[in-house]
Image (cartoon, helix red, strand yellow):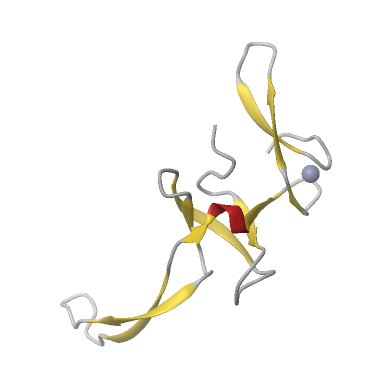
Amino acid sequence: MPKIKKNDITKIMTGKDRGKSGKVLAVFPDKGRALVQGLNLVKKHARRTKEDQQGGIIQKESTIAISNLMVVCQKCNKPTRIGFSALSDGTKVRICKKCKELI
Ligand SMILES: [Zn+2]
């Protein structure tokens, strides 16, 4: 079970965006990386297309190592380590190690 899932709010712990948080747009478990909205932006040169008449330089998210991200618990509103637990029916769930609430 992955620690980080799409739509989680995460905080980046290292690099130029350290301390910023954003929503997970995509996770690439085989690479151990994730794409987070608004974080680790890189400038890319865009070609002019029919949809984008301006072209030029655009900013786009690039992936971040999952080990540099912490999930922000929606209950206690803090970046936290993720624990795992199983419900009575066997469903595995993620819990906040700080407040023990489900994430
Ligand atoms: Zn919590």
Above or below, 17 against 54 in this view is above
Q: Which residue is drawn at 67% across and 64% down?
A: 13
Ligand 1 is in which quadrant of the figure? top right
Q: Where is residue 58 in the image (x, y as percent from the top left)?
A: 36, 81
Question: Would residue 49 be found to the left or right of residue 68 on screen?
Answer: left
Of 16 and 51, the residue lying toward us: 16
Q: Is residue 61 above or below residue 32?
A: below
Identity of the residue drawn at 83% across and 43% down:
98
Quarter that holds the N terminus:
top right
Count up the numbered dots.
Answer: 0
Left-right relation of 28 to 73: left
Q: What residue is rendered at 66% in x and 53% in y?
A: 70
Q: Which residue reaches farthest left?
A: 50
Which residue in the rendered view is the most extreme toward the top? Answer: 89
Quick check: 62 left or right of 50? Answer: right
Above or below residue 22? Residue 95 is above
Residue 83 position, x and y percent, is: 71, 35
**Where is residue 23, by image quadrant?**
bottom right
Which residue is found at the position 53% from the left and 69% from the top?
Answer: 39
Left or right: 14 in relation to 101: left
Residues 55 and 43: in front is 43
Quadrant holding the C terminus: top right
